[in-house]
Structures are given as structure tokens and as C-alpha cells.
Image (spheres, grey):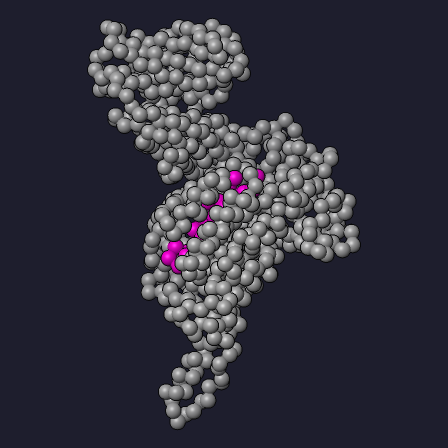
Amino acid sequence: MKSTPRATRRAWGCVSAGAAALGFVLLCSSGGRAGDRGIPGQTREEVTVTVKLVQAYVTAKDGKPVTDLTAADFEVTDNGKSMPVTHFENHILGGDDVAPGVPVEGPRLGRKLFLFFDFAFIDPRGSRKAREAALHFIDSAVKPSDEVGVMSYSPMRGLTIHEYLTTDHAQIRRIIDAFGLRAATGRAESLTNFLYADELRHMQDDMTAGQQAGQASNAGTAEGFFANLAKAQLGGVVDEGRRQGYVDQARQFAQTFANLARALRYVPGWKNIILFSSGFSRALITGQGSGLSVPSMNARDPEAMMAEMNAYDNAQSNSGVRTEFATALKELKTSNSPIYSIDCSLPLGEMDINNPLASSVGSRELSGKDSLIQLAGETGGKYFSNSMDYRNALATVEDITSAYYVLGYSVPAAWDGAFHKIKVKVARPGCKVSSQNGYYNPKPFREYTKFEKLLQMTDLALNDNPQSQLPVEAPMGVMPVMVGGWPHVVAFVGLSKEVAASVIGTRANAFLLLYDEDQGRSNIKSFNLKQPADGPKACFPTFMVPLNPGRYSCRIIVQNAETGLGARGSASLVIPKAAASSVWLDPPLLLEVDTGGLDLGAAPEATLSALFGYDPGKYAPLVGGLAAGPQRVCVALRSTLGAPDLELVITASDLQAADRTDVPVTVLDMRQTKSLRSYLLELSFANLKPGFHTLAIVAKDKMGGPGNETTTTFTVK
């Protein structure tokens, strides 16, 4: 998926934010910076060329991979036009070789795997086997560079995105290991539930009575799908009085895959979906053909005639299911999402003693085997029959998906959402090529459906290498502070004036994602941002959240609500257990003299200036490194005192490697509210040397009582 272009799509001197549509962007300008995109008045040249990356699997007649092909062996056509291969990668049997001459900074197209668990059409035994097989696959077949996601479908909640594409395989394993045993919420599930709740709130606020009356008629649309899915995820009622029967579940199952495929179409390369399911009845697609006869239309026995007619009608295929299923197959095929169907139904020859009729001749029409075969066959995947040995099936999936080539070629950039058909051939006789069917050009963010925006945000927030766009990586600060006697985390990012103009624009949203590394739990907060009326300014979006002691990883994402452009920062911290002390010092906040910044928070008391007691009209957080040599640096320091009238003596020192240098301290200002005292200090560094530094500040009781020490780190350029 892609962010929308501005009025003209410009180069900004690095890989474009929308470069992941199926490749990367070659730039025509030079000298730009990542933060310079969209700067009014800046001279830039158009981005005109995109390199499309295509994955291709090549096998010999015996089905084994062909391992020694070069770029010259391939012929690629895009909408019938022959395209020279300018980028070539070999990922055969664990290899990862790039052809000579390919720039090392170019993109790599690795393996993407979605483990999809269908809990609607699968029995408990099949669920257990699927869980065991998936865990074995994670432990034995997944490579460190593989991006893996976990999704599930259930009658009550519909599609759940437990974890999006990530190389954190330990997290993936934890999610799968918890299926059927205990509750385990993945980071993606926490984020999507948060976004669902926010969208539902806006939808309810905006919805008129007439819109509510027509809601049911929109159930089959993309927006109707999103609304129903949001309600189901949050435990609400999908539709009052709606019959959640087998046919309805089959339609929703097909709709889920269709909408998922539409959202995945802008993610580059193959999106291999390993589906654990029993499928749904063949009769819903093709109709029941055995054991039935045309109704006799015996008018002398109306009741018997009606019974025969009802039985005949019920045995016919369901046009809604058939249509939805055909749509899903088409979308999966064009989004390059092959499905590897692992049939989790009862193995052939077994019989449920509680349902002996299931083993009758007509049982195939009630089984889901044919639906799984179609899903696999028409999407370019493979079907694995119902067997107790799922490990062999997944070993075959590993062999199929791990041996491939990547071919790249240049095409003019376009943002029209059009589909391009791709054909890949190999000149060598006896080779069979399986490649992507094509790709979609990116489309403007404003044309995304709500579900597409949901996946785009999940990708942007959680993926270390987002497929949807390359965000501006913003400097982030995070520190533990004591507020009202309770430990909190304060997290902020620094957005320069240029970045804020592009990313915030007229309206944006800021999100804080906190992950408790000890408990495996996520916490999400957000608030809205707006640029001031007098024009763009440097911004410091800030969050303050109460937390228990422990280890946390944090990420702040700022996303333009209209264009989808994003900036983000990442950090980690440890919140220690508070020790009894007459003087408690929070980590110091380094400041620079700056009169043009904008202090932002979810509430006025949650901004940095309100927390640390400095004037935001004169100072701003220091988010970059310091220059070498003599420097005067301002520092905001918070202290919580056991006695409000305690007099403190404050000293500071600079630690670099084994050197410790005393730093003179001048108190510029002091403010106090009850037991909270805030200092504005000036530190005079005699000669800062390039490298990594630790600033230590000590506050001692002037009368000789116990004091305390706090530290922070900074770099010198």
C-alpha cells in the first residue's frame, strides 16, 4: 500500500515514501534530505522511474528448483511490452546472492508468510494439529530474514490480525502457542482493535438516522465489511437479528479473503498464505448432485410437494457464496497471494461415531475439500489433503517458497491504481516458471478503503521495514518520571519545521505504542494534531502514561490523516522500582534556545514544558547531537522532595569512556508546586569531544542529608 502523492510527486534525495508498491524509486534530483519532502518553495525534480521487483519460481521437469539461472536467462513482459532485467537476486535453497553490479543499497525482496487459522470451519482436534504444525514450522523452517504474520478467522470475531509481517519470530511463536490454551494478544491485534474502536466512534458520530437504516444494504461493500468487522472485533453485534448460519459464515469467509487480498495488493512480492482449514461445503458452490430428484409437483399432496421443493432448493448452490468466492479467488490471484491449503478435516477412512452419515457417498458434497483445492489451485498455491502428518505438508511449503529469483525492471511511475499483467519466461528448455501475475500501481491514500488504511497503519507502526511507505525516522526521547507519586513514562518525537509541514499538514494523528517486554502486553494512546494557523513550526508531540516498573519498547507514529505520510521514532526504557528517598530526581531533559517550536500533548498538563517547568516560547527539547568544543547547554530537572522546604546543592559531571569531568552549574530558574520542584539549569562544558557522553547530575541536601543522582546520555558530533 502507498501513501498519496502531493499535487506533484517529488524526489527528496532518498527512497520514496511510496517506493514499496513493488520496488523502489530512482531519483532524478540530488542533495535533498529525508525531511525535505513537500517543502513549499523548494526546487525539486519529478520522480519518473520506478523499479518493479518480481519473484519467480523456476523448476525442472522433476519438480526440483533450477539453481543456476542468470538475468540473461529471463524474459519479462509488462502489459505485453518486453522489459530489460536490470535488477537480479538469487534466493535459491537458502542463498541470497545479488548479481554483480547491483547496488547494495537497493531493495531486497524476501519471503513473506502469513499463517492463517480458520476457526470457523475446523473442529477442535484440527485446531490442535494446526497449532502443533505451525509451531514446528516456526521452529524448523522459518529463516531469520523471513517476515511472518499471524491471522485467524472465527464466527464471532471475523478476521483477527494477531501479528502483522515481522521478523520477531519469538513473538509469532508466543501468539500461536497460546491458541486454545490461554489469551494472548499480539501487538497488531491491540493496535487494530484500538483503530477499530476509534473508527466506530467516528462512524457513530457521523451517521444519520437514514444512514443507519441503510446500513444493512451496505454489508457487502468494502466499508460495510470494515464496519461489521470492527463491531465483531470489539464484541458488538454485527447486525441485529442477522442469521449467523453456515451460509452466512461461508459468505463472510469469502468476503474476508477478498478484502484482505485487495489490501495486500500493494505489498511487494509473493504473500504466501498458509491456510489451516477444513473449507466449506462444496454444495454451496456447485450444488448437491447426489440423492436428489426433481420435485414431482404432485398437486394432490401439497405438503409432500412443498417438502420436495424445499429439499431441492436447499441442495442448489448458493449464488451469494458462489459470487463472493469467485471474487475472492480473483483478488487473491491478482494480489500475488498464493494459498497453501492444509486440510484439517477428518482423514479419509475415519468416521465420527456421533455422525455416521458423514461417511456416506454424498459426504464429499458436504466437505470443504473442493473449496480448499480451488483456493490453492487458482491462486498458484498447493493443496495438502487431510492427513495426520501436517509436518510433511509444511516441509513441502518450505521447499516451494524458499527457492526463487527476484527480477527488477524500470517503468514510468504512476499513481492510477491500474493493474499491470506480468509474464516471465525462461529461455532454457525444460524449465517451468511460476511468477507473479502482475501488480497494481499505487493509488492516492484518499482512495483507500478503511480496511486498507488499517493495514497500512499496522504496517507503518509495527514493521521494521514497512512495505507501505518508508517513514521519516524522527528522533525520539523517552524517560521515566514520577508524577503524583506514581511512575510514568514520558515519550516524545522531534519533528522539524520541514517534516511537520509535510507529515502533519492540516491534520494528523499521533500514536504511542508501548510494549511490555516482561508481560507481553501492549498499551496504545493517541491524540490529534493540527498545524497552527500562522504556518508550520517544529513540533514535539508528547505522551505521558502511567506504567509499572519493567522493561518497555516504545514507538511514536505521526501520520497525516489526508495523505498517509508518516514519521516515527523508536526507543526502549527501563522503569525502575522507586526507592525510598528524601530527594527523587527524574532524568534531566536537555534543551536548546528556540522560539519557534510547538509543544503538543493530549492535554495541556501532558506537554514537555508543563511537566518540566520551562518556557516553551524560549526553549525546545534538544533532539540532535551537540557540536564539539565549548558549549553552554540548558537542562530542565524535576525533583520530588520529601520535605517541601529542602535546600539542594546541584552538581554535574560529564562522563565519556573512563574520563569524568566536572561541569559548572548555574540555576537560571526554579519553580515549586507542593513537593515538586523544577529547575532550569545552565551547564558550561569546557571542551566537548566527539562521541557518546553520559551526563550525571547530583542533588544533595545542603544540611548534609541524603541526596540522589540521575543521568542521561547525549552524543557530540
Q: Is residue 715 magenta?
A: no
Instruction: Look at 50% across and 68% down and name the residue there.
Output: 349
Q: Is residue 9 left or right of residue 287?
A: right
Given residues 596 and 72, the one toward you in this image is: 72
Q: Residue furthest bottom?
A: 300
Q: Total label count?
A: 0
Q: Which residues are magenta?
A: 145-167
The quadrant of the rendering that contains the C terminus is top right
Q: Is residue 33 left or right of residue 428?
A: left
Main secondary structure of the magenta stretch? strand
Whole-percent x and y of residue 57? 67, 50
Whole-percent x and y of residue 581? 26, 17
Instruction: Reply above or below: 223 against 289.
Output: above
Instruction: Look at 41% across and 7% down and name the residue there.
Output: 663
Residue 232 can be seen, yes or no: yes
Instruction: Look at 25% across and 26% down and name the residue there.
Output: 484
Instruction: Reply above or below: 341 against 510.
Output: below
Whole-percent x and y of residue 16? 59, 37
Instruction: Look at 38% across and 70% down and name the residue there.
Output: 354
Residue 216 location, quadrant: bottom left
Instruction: Reply above or below: 206 against 594.
Output: below
Instruction: Reply above or below: 255 against 648.
Output: below
Whole-percent x and y of residue 83? 74, 47
Q: Is residue 671 left or right of residue 518?
A: left
Q: Is residue 153 magenta?
A: yes
